[in-house]
Image (cartoon, coloured by chain):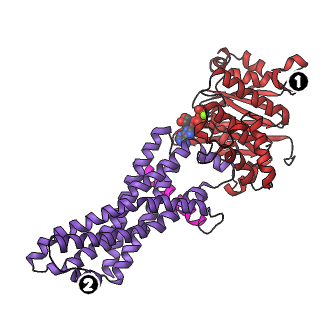
Chain colours: A purple, B red
Amino acid sequence: MLDFLKPPIQTFQDFFLLAGRALRTLPRRPHYGDDISLQMDMIGVGSVPIVLLVGFFSGAVMALQMSRALAQYGATGQVGQIVAITLVRELGPVLTSLLVAGRVGSGIASELGSMKVTEQIDAMRALGTDPVQKLVKPRLTATAFTLPLLTIIADFVGMVGGYLMAVPVLSLTTGAQYWNNAYRSLEYNDITQGLLKPFLFAIIIALVGCYYGLRTTGGTQGVGRATTQAVVVASIWIFVTNLMVTRIFVNL
Amino acid sequence: MAEGRDNTVLRFENVSVAFDDVLALDKVSFVLERGESRVVLGTAGSGKTTLLKTAVGLIRPDSGRVELLGHDISKMEESELYDLRSRVGILFQEVGLFDSLTVEENVAYPLRNQHTRQAVNSDLREQVVEALRFVELEHTLDKFPSELSGGMRRRVGIARAVVTAPDVVLYDSPTAGLDPITAYTIMGLLIKERDIRNAATVMVTHRYQDGQLLANFRYNPQAGEIEPASRNGSRADLRTKFMVLQEGRLVFEGVQEELEASTDPYVSKFVRR
Ligand SMILES: Nc1ncnc2c1ncn2[C@@H]1O[C@H](COP(=O)(O)OP(=O)(O)O)[C@@H](O)[C@H]1O
Ligand SMILES: [Mg+2]
């Protein structure tokens, strides 16, 4: 009767099996340092331009949106605080992670998927290499390390975008007040959740990408399917996890 | 070399493998002895690839027992399997060359990676070149797999499979998708590898003529090419058996004469082509 529940439960179980294996390989040698630095370059450095762009525009649009609301209360001086808090707590981590899910998660899934359908994964296992160690671990560590850094970049560039909108364009406040206000509004709690979120999202992106890549079947078509699934599923889990983490931090 | 209890290289006992609702292997049992050749025939989707992957533990049987080189691998940990797999050469259907590595690095991979072979780096290159010379591709060392034709990729795959001088070599559809001339070249390499080193050979194919070549031809080291085995006397030293898979079931096992005499409509379809 509950047969329709079987596939998702199976998927869930398989996913956590992979996650468990990946975590267990973390301390174990070999570490494939070259692969890790290559992945950091592709995932981290490669994502910088798009993160700059999105960070800048989301900061600017926040300042623009808030300008009218704040003017109603005569609180335009608080624009720095609003921009800083929304960026650091929510927009920075979530937007950056969604972008990286689209860019990196799909890349991981399609690369591993192609390797799967051309039997490179089987060849690896046949020739004495653990694909989790060689493929999953470098992608997981590289994403988990670089996504928080990318988020910091996005947060900062977003505040610059907010500043340019608020001060030179709309003259809501002075530059000194904007930055002072932004800086003082941020608490330890905000920074922690602002960095914890991208760290968790990174784990989701990398593991979901690897999971759908490694279970690809059905040739080239299957690779396309795996890629789409990886992005969709990772994005959903980013939103769900975001809500849960926010819930915890709001109560702190 | 001889580690098993007897001469058995590979033993399947009632092995079943299921994917979702498909039975890819259905209670398959057979034994492969040292120095023996085996041709596995079957249509697409009959379970040929699954059979080979199960033989080396890349796929785990849902029930039954697989014994490789004297070890029961059905319940072995992946990490325990690595040493055993290093004594097996595999050519995958899709070849599975690492496309981020050059031809040289691909062929060197098993030598570098497999724990049981601690090759010195200097003769490593020599071994790689020798393996590539065997498939007549020693000039492609620095190329990437994407720069090679399908037939050349298969040949590099063969070089990678045999560079470690394995006890058993498994070939998954080595001639699929190739023109007849290239297919004949590939078959020549299989026969040469088998006859020079006397390795147990399992070849999966949907083409009966491949099986016929493997069963009836041998490598002549003087001439450097393959020739009908009967020309130099008996075929007694050639021990080739055929197996036919139908939807995961082993429906035939025997020598060529028995295969050709079979009246089973599915089995005889392979012979008539
Ligand atoms: N990873 C897999 N997931 C689901 N079904 C599979 C998988 N691998 C093989 N199968 C199914 O198992 C059957 C046997 O496949 P296979 O061994 O690849 O056949 P062959 O190599 O003889 O063409 C087919 O029906 C195929 O669809
Ligand atoms: Mg196949």
Outermost residue to the front: A168
Residue, disc 1 = B236
Q: Where is residue B184, by image quadrant?
A: top right
Q: Is residue B220 above or below residue B155?
A: above
Secondary structure under badge 2?
helix
Contact, mark 2 vs mark 1 (Cβ under 8 Å): no
Can the viewer see residue B95?
Answer: yes
Asked whether mark 2 and ligand 1 are closer than 8 Å, the reply comes as no
Q: Where is residue B140, by image quadrant?
A: top right
Q: On the same chain: label 2 and label 1?
A: no
The residue segment tinted magenta is A1-27
Secondary structure under badge 1?
loop
- The amino acid pointed to by label 1 is Ala
Nearer-the-camera pick, A77 or B36: A77
Of circles 2 and 1, the one toward us is 2
**Chain to which mark 1 belongs:** B
Identify the disc placed on residue A63.
none
Q: Residue at x 10, y 80 (%)?
A: A74
Nearer-the-camera pick, A177 or A91: A177
- Horizontal and vertical percent position of residue A93: 35, 68
Q: Residue at x 80, y 36 (%)?
A: B200
Nearer-the-camera pick, B240 or B180: B180
Question: Is residue A221 highlighted in magenta?
Answer: no
Question: Is residue A18 highlighted in magenta?
Answer: yes
Q: Which quarter shows the C terminus of chain B?
A: top right
Q: Residue at x 80, y 53 (%)?
A: B122
- Horizontal and vertical percent position of residue A177: 21, 83
**Chain to which mark 2 belongs:** A
Outermost residue to the right: B233
Task: Compute the Cα span from label 2 to label 1.
Answer: 93 Å
Identify the disc placed on residue A180.
2
Q: Is residue A111 above or below residue B168?
A: below
